[in-house]
Amino acid sequence: MDLPQTAEDILPTLNRPMPFSDEAEKGVLSCILQDPERLTRAFNAMPTALFYHEGNREIFTTMVDELVANRPIDPVSLTHRLRSNGRLDHVGGAASISELYSFVPVASHFQYYLGTLRTLYTQRKNIEAHVKALDGLFKTSEADLPAALDAAKGLIEEAGKMPGQALKSRSVAESIGPLLDEIEVRAANPGRLPGITTGMTTLDKHTGGMMPGQVWVFAGEPGDGKSTIMQNLAEAAAAEGNRVRWYPLEMTHNEQVLRLLASSAGVDNSKIYSGIMARGEQMALTGACGRLQRLKIDLVDVEDATATDILADMERSDAPIIVLDYLQLLDDSGGRKSDTRETVLANISRRAKRLARRTGKTILTASQLNDSGRLRESRAIGQDADKVFLVKKFEDKNSETGFDDERRILWCDKNRGGRRHWEVPLRFMGSVFQFKEEIG
């Protein structure tokens, strides 16, 4: 008898569909049609995934859209909206909406049906998490088993969390003590940078350094130096003894280490590639190797890793500085097939922000700009971030291209808790992957 090789091999042997109740789903929708205020009070605790049946999910999504747009939710309006979206036949036609209205006798049964949906949703999430955990364990070598078990535990714990559950709270009286302690430490060390230095005087002055629990986003067009400026901030943090955990989604480890070597040695990266170096450059490279080996910088293998894998790894890490290069390259196979790219990225962005706050880490990441000069694919990236910096080319009318490629402007577009719309003039030394602040 052949043993199963993956978790997917086990599922067919179970010979059972995922748990769901069409009656409970229609019951909830019927109660909302009869009393739309129930959706107003409960929709934040009602993820779309509560509805397993695709047609019911389509109806619920349309109801939420109507609620957000401040339009009426009734059988006639709902039928019209579904018809205008080309989805009415997909949910069974106008007759199905009419039947849905009278599916339950009274709307007060709402909480009973909703409770059933929440229970079934939790069961499905647990099944999916266990299957994914099993799949990860099947593919894990013995040496990596402890880490895989931790990841599996995290997946299962996350699956048990129900949206809309009661949240913990703490009174202002309980919170004020730790804040006063922090203020006292700052008063005893006047002028001391509260966060980890960025290595740039103006940046530290306006931001207080890389503060715990924050997400910094560097946005720009391709080739403007987003990855380089994150590298320089990480180098400054590591030089002070801080551990840095680096997720290079855009380049190989060899490429990333070469960039660090070129920066530390001040040697043109093309000379390192070719091996044609003067004696002084060879000595500089040797010294850079020694310095880099003393720094606590960990490059993470992200091959085939999903956003969930990477966020879970960040959570377990003891590094206060995280470099995620870059956010828009992340994907997550756990999303619904109907999710747009913007929805996927918005979800990842929110999870990264919550992780930063919960763990006290500083996450440095980057985002490309669209043709309109805005963050590409998802506005949530900028909304969730604490700091947003635009890396801009320096205009030079005397140049053939109209820009001075050896200079950049770092423009502060968002600075939560501080002043924004200030800039840092930078000298860009692309051959050695360095930015230097232009002072005076």
Image (tube, grey):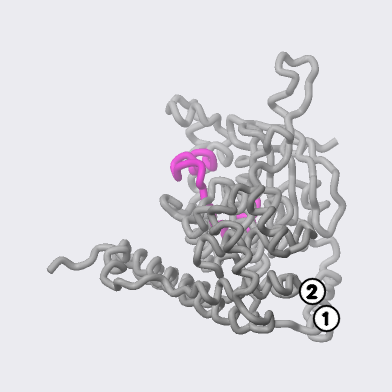
Q: CA distance from mark 2 to mark 1?
A: 10 Å
Label 1: state its secondary structure: helix
- For mark 2, what is the residue? 182
Label 2: state its secondary structure: helix
Please tell me which residue is depicted at 72% across the width and 38% down the height of the picture: 391
What range of the chain is rendered magenta? Answer: 236-261
Task: Choose top left, top right, bottom left or bottom right for residue 162.
Answer: bottom right
Please tell me which residue is depicted at 49% across the width and 75% down the height of the picture: 21
Placement of 242 over or under 155, stated as above or below: above
Please tell me which residue is depicted at 65% across the width and 64% down the height of the picture: 356
Please tell me which residue is depicted at 70% across the width and 74% down the height of the picture: 42
Closer to the eye: label 2 or 1: 1
Kind of residue sitting beneath label 2: Glu
Q: Is residue 255 magenta?
A: yes
The one of 424 and 71 positioned closer to us in this rendering: 71
**Image coords of residue 229 (percent x, y):** 65, 42
Q: Would residue 123 appear left or right of 381 to someone viewing this image?
A: left
- Quarter of the picture containing the N terminus is bottom left
Task: Choose top left, top right, bottom left or bottom right for residue 69.
Answer: bottom right
Q: Would residue 244 appear left or right of 221 to someone viewing this image?
A: left
**Image coords of residue 88 (percent x, y):** 59, 53
- For mark 1, what is the residue? 176
**Tag of residue 232:** none
**Image coords of residue 213 (percent x, y):** 69, 64
Residue 361 in view of the camera: yes
Q: Would residue 250 appear left or right of 342 to someone viewing this image?
A: left
